Amino acid sequence: MDSENSSDHKGGLPRGGGTPTASIDSRGRVVGWSSGARDLLGYEADEVVGRGASELLAAKLPLSTLARLPKGTEWGDTLVLRHRDGYAVDAAVWAVRQRGPGGRDVWTLYAVNSLSSPEAEDHVSAHVALREAALSQLPVAVAVHDSGGSMVGANHAFLRLMVEQRPGHDPPDAEPRLDSPHDHVTRFVLRVLETGKPVQQELSVASPEGRRPRTWSVLVSPVQDTSGRTRGATTTLSDITDAARARWRLAVVNEASVRIGTSLEVVRTAEELAELAVNRFADYVAVDLLDTVYSGGESKPGSPADTTAMRRAANRSVIQGCPEAVFAPGDLSLFQATSPLSHALVSGRPARFDVDDPEIAAWLSTRPLQSWNARAFGMHSALFIPIRARETPLGFALFVRHRTPEPFDDDDLLLADEITARAAVCIDNARRYTRERLTSLTLQRSLLPRRAPSEAALDVASRYLPAGAQAGVGGDWFDVIPLSGARVALVVGDVVGHGVHASATMGRLRTAVRTLADVDLSPEELLTRLDDLVLRMDREEGWDRDDGDAPASAGEVGATCLYAVYDPVSRRCTVARAGHPPPALVRPDGVVQFPDLPAGPPLGLGGLPFESRVLDLPEDSLIALYTDGLVESADHDMDAGIGRLREALSDAHGPLEQICDKVVADLLPDAPTDDVALLIARTYALDSSHVATWDLPADPTVVAHARKQTAERLEAWGLEEVSFVAELVVSELVTNAIRYGGAPIQLRLIRGHALILEVTDANSTAPHLRRARTFDEGGRGLLLVAQLTDRWGTRHSMSGGKTIWAELRLADGS
């Protein structure tokens, strides 16, 4: 529309130059005429308004226009108009249906481009000059192609891109150009001409002289005539190098967040950093770590104590075999304290170097091997990025280019710094985890028995396998505890959780089990006491977490346990468990059984009873105790694992160590996801040749007879060297039983790895060791027993009586 709004003309349209505009009513008559229309066709408004619009046409309306008119929608087409002087004027017209004066609908026509008469040549030339200037100054490259794909018009930006740059033929101030994207554009144009559908692509073309490739957004659109047929195409090229580069850098950073830090291993994390960099933007990468970091130790904040001695963690190259590397993984990589690498490491700032920089050249002159490598492989650009986390130096990463012609730039330095910072956090986490894992594992192994005690009742073999690096050391444990009467207790347990806390909890429980076992508690009673201990530990954890205000909720400390006591004299094994898998029994005939034992609740629940069951074990039976990590994993449940354990034990012949190895090999992967404790024992029996028993009346005169019987049996066993001490101990124990106990009284001698002397009576009152005063008549008997024997103690029986026992070590251990 015109910018003026005067009403001194008919039709009420503005006058005074501007866009040629006319209004036509529904009967096809002109009802409005602008000064721009006057300038276009030469008619004054009063000459045109009221006349039929068809009189202004020099040719019939196009069929496409006639098809759109009845629809009442906007339309545009090229019309041939007649000038007042009689010649034809081609005009590109856009028509819009609007509400006119009096509420009647009118068509408002705008002529947006035209070629007029020779008299208007100056006017047309100005328009052409304006159009050409606009096209030439567009910030994007534009071209027009005919139906055969040939370029029939283009602005200067496009023409510059199409000219192939040839070294030695360009002016000194020539801008960098593409080699020639002409072939790519031609292919896109031909596709558009064939399909009639636009094509939009991103095109990356290498630039000459080793410059970084530039990226262009290419849009090829069809040009169609009024009938809808494709007559040509237009091409638009936009330089999006910076945006594409930013997207690529973000993609690499995102890739680093996925590929770096997949394991909690320091060296593997360094390798992942090197692999990513070589795959994306570097030709050779070396990662060096401080020696303490490499081994999982603690690095002190601030400047590293020694920047001259590092340890190579990773080498990666685009060349097979990584021949550029001077140091192999694991080697100490030595650098001078005055080298640029050491300076950058101490400052903590990333740096970019060219090989011909004076500082680098001076350093290489003192390093013949590195200097030779730089020349041999054509190294020309390098990035040095310190690896730091929590203000603590960990090492550095070196990125080098020799196959890629363009040198590193500031964007590459920023990208390398970003992915190295990501790797630094992962390396620090891996280092801290490694240190904690080593601490936990050391604590765990120090708390487990280093070797099974030598007992006449059992042969024992065991295995402990910590979980893989991702899971961490847990709280599985086992123990073999000698008891009185040649009996042996077998224990296996599993503490909830992983890490140092689980190992410490395991140590407390193992110590408690040993203490309770020394009291000779029955298995179910021992688990009850252990359950109370876990409850107290849980409450202590709660107080610690809440700073003493109130105990936190229970359940943070928990464990399972299986406790079994084997008696080689009766050949019976009494077993109780607290939420733990049942043991496996292998009979001498090879039959594998998993006895149905009362399950019992896990330790730490409280208030629920534990029950035991007595199993008869023939001599040469196997009993296998284990934790759930042996039979349960993510790929199979416990029932399937127990089935595999049954198969592994079905051919359990030979030494126990071989049996343990076979079970572990058949059931476990190389890196189990949970801790595993395995304890296998082979049972023996002590027959009448190793046991002597006498029932004694509650008569003081029987003491001498008991001493005589003891001496005779020890002589028969060939143990005369301990006969004197044994007679004194028997005399004291039998005398105490007669004086303070009650009938029936029984004396039993057991010959195993030690000589065991036992006196049983019906009184449940246990004696106590006390120091007799000068004029006391009693109180010296147990003191004498304690001084003469290696161990002594009291155990109570289910029937209400007690047994006082003492052990004498034998010289040959038989």
Image (spheres, helix red, strand yellow):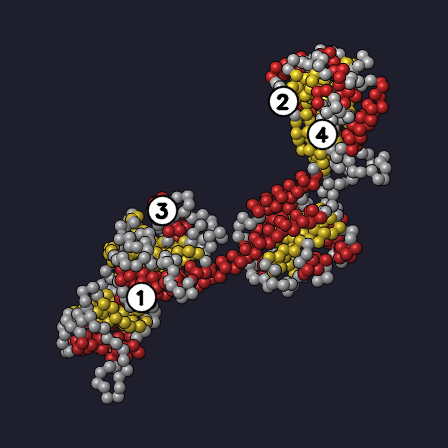
* Tag in front: 4 or 2: 2
| SS under mark 2 | strand
Q: Which residue is mark 2?
A: 99
Give the distance between the C-alpha atoms of the residues marked 2 and 3, in whole angstroms: 83 Å
Q: Residue at x 67, y 61 (%)?
A: 346
Q: Position of residue 569 (x, y in %)?
A: 24, 62
First in residue order: circle 1 vs circle 3: 1
Q: Which residue is mark 4?
A: 236
* Tag in front: 2 or 1: 2
Give the distance between the C-alpha atoms of the residues marked 1 and 3, in whole angstroms: 30 Å
Give the distance between the C-alpha atoms of the residues marked 4 and 2, in whole angstroms: 38 Å
Q: Which mark is residue 175?
A: none
Quadrant placement of the N terminus: top right
Say how many tags the image has: 4
Which amino acid type is shown beneath numbered disc 1? Leu
Which amino acid type is shown beneath numbered disc 4? Thr
* 36, 501: nearer the viewer: 36
Q: Which residue is mark 1?
A: 516
Give the distance between the C-alpha atoms of the residues marked 4 and 3, in whole angstroms: 66 Å
